[in-house]
Amino acid sequence: MSKPKSTSKAATAQLKTSAPRPRRVGLVSLGCAKNLVDAEIMLGSLLKSGVEIVNDASQADAVIVNTCSFIDAAQEESVDTILEHNALREASNRGQALIVSGCMPQRFRDELPKLMPEVDVFMGIDQVEQVGRLVEDAITKRATRVAPPAPADPSVAKAVKGRLQQIAAQAPAHSHDHDEEPAQGTAKSGKTRITLTVPSKPAGPSVDVTVRPLYIPQFETPRFRLTPGHFAYVKIAEGCNHPCSFCIIPRMRGSHRSRPQRDVVAEARALIADGVRELNLISQDSTYYGLDLRPNHSRAIASPDRFTAATQALPADATTLCTLLRELNALKGDFWIRLLYTHPAHWTDELIRTIAECPKVARYVDMPLQHIHDEMLTRMRRETSGQYIRDLIAKIRAGIPGIAIRTTFIVGFPGETETHFKTLLRFIEETRFERLGVFAYSKEDGTVAGKMEKQLTPRLRQKRRELAMAAQHQVAVSVSESFVGRTLKVLVEGEASAKELAKADISSWEHGLIRGGDAGMGQLKGRYLVARGEADAPDIDGRVYIRGKLPIGRFAQVRIVGHTDYDLIAEPA
């Protein structure tokens, strides 16, 4: 090989100054892990197109805010974040483009451009792989819109949030009766975009949103992971078919659509080769995975009886969650497979057997139950009864020894009486869930529950959440105490910061209030490593604090020597 010709420093400097710098983009992602995967896909697509990703928003040519609209509080956080970034660019970088993606544009695609004219482009879920084009569109549009800065108006955020609630209240309750097919592999692929233009102002925001999304990612889709190197989220499906009366997700995310099994397995294999030790399988309903891939499928199989009949009628080579778990379990390597977002109506005896027979599948299941009283389950349109739930939990625990069950409940739902609530409290105390979160009901306009009579006051909802968490607190302390003296396999995450050691309250938009104050955290003084066991999903569950040195991002055996209310204290075994 010949050596390259030498180049003078002056010539090199000239080349550097003449070459245009790449576009710089910053991104803020709010909400759930599924939204995070969308953000990772956007970043991957941008990097593939030559864009530079920056952490300092003031240095970006464009900023993307990936929004959540799951409940009112999440929506308010999204509005605040958008307006904060608009204020930042007004102060320091007025030519910067502002792009809003995620669930808010999906839910309010017609109204947001009028309410938030500061935004340059609103984009939908189907457009995540087209983000490079939309960034260029937004930068071009911004250049035509820059005007003398206006003073900040603190009333804007309040007005936007109030108007969004009014718009949602006027929308018809979602009936979940659409029959869209996934675009992947069909003539619709790449042709699902609907571009709307706001006619009121020529220089107003652009809206690039599919009315009802059909997108699902593929293995070949570029992706830049935002999680630590030792774990990753794997989106196995998108959308939801359930008719839950309190939920807006199907209206924003569309009908359930599964990725092909070979595609998911290819992604998992690549992640394991890249050093990932934990695959977190996510979707809106992971237990429904594959059922939409059967020929001439009907979506009207949400109830346990219909779902079981549909699975029993499948051909031997059909794709299901069980076939996916078994193939992932057969991959080479030392890793966990964590199953998140299962629905109680879609558990089968075969799924229980599969988890029990697959050692790489973590002894952990995330299964939101929402309530236990039959009248509440009916009003919530959960398709299960209290007795069905009790029998299912007993079967899961008997069939998978050592399983940790995570669940969530909604308290203060419309029509919930003191009797209903006390039934739930007794159930929490008797069932002793290893992990549990509680929501105070959030009235979501555009849902069936949002129009129900007998709405409870916010104060009563919060009071019931506190009482439910108090009941679970006693269970949590007992569960933590039961681990002392045992040896566990854990995944070491890193060194715990002082801030993390002092952290007690944890909540999320998807899992409610997960833990209250932890009086035992005060005993953690000095240097600790933080790790997770099989019973602990990232960000939402307990932690294992280790005194000693262990490799980061690897599995280790530790001996449990103590506990706080929610966490464990350990030493290397």
Image (tube, grey):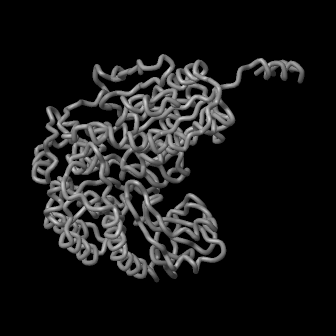
Residue 537 appears anywhere in the view: yes
Identity of the residue drawn at 59% across and 60% down: 552
Identity of the residue drawn at 14% across and 42% down: 314
On screen, residue 182 versus residue 138, left or right, reads left
Identity of the residue drawn at 62% across and 64% down: 495
Q: Quadrant of residue 470?
A: bottom left
Q: Quadrant of residue 409?
A: bottom left
On screen, residue 546 versus residue 457, left or right, reads right
Residue 356 appears anywhere in the view: no
Identity of the residue drawn at 57% across and 31% down: 47
Q: Quadrant of the C terminus?
A: bottom right
In the rendered image of this protein, does residue 303 appear above or below residue 17? below
Q: How many marks?
A: 0
Viewer-closest of 485 and 204: 204
Q: Percent from the top left, x then y, of residue 503?
A: 55, 68
Q: Percent from the top left, x then y, of residue 111?
A: 38, 31
Viewer-closest of 159 and 128: 159
In the rendered image of this protein, does residue 283 appear above or below residue 511? above
Viewer-closest of 479 and 336: 479
Q: Percent from the top left, x then y, of residue 510?
A: 38, 54
On screen, residue 166 versus residue 348, left or right, reads right
Q: Quadrant of the N terminus?
A: top right
Q: Percent from the top left, x then y, of residue 287?
A: 26, 50
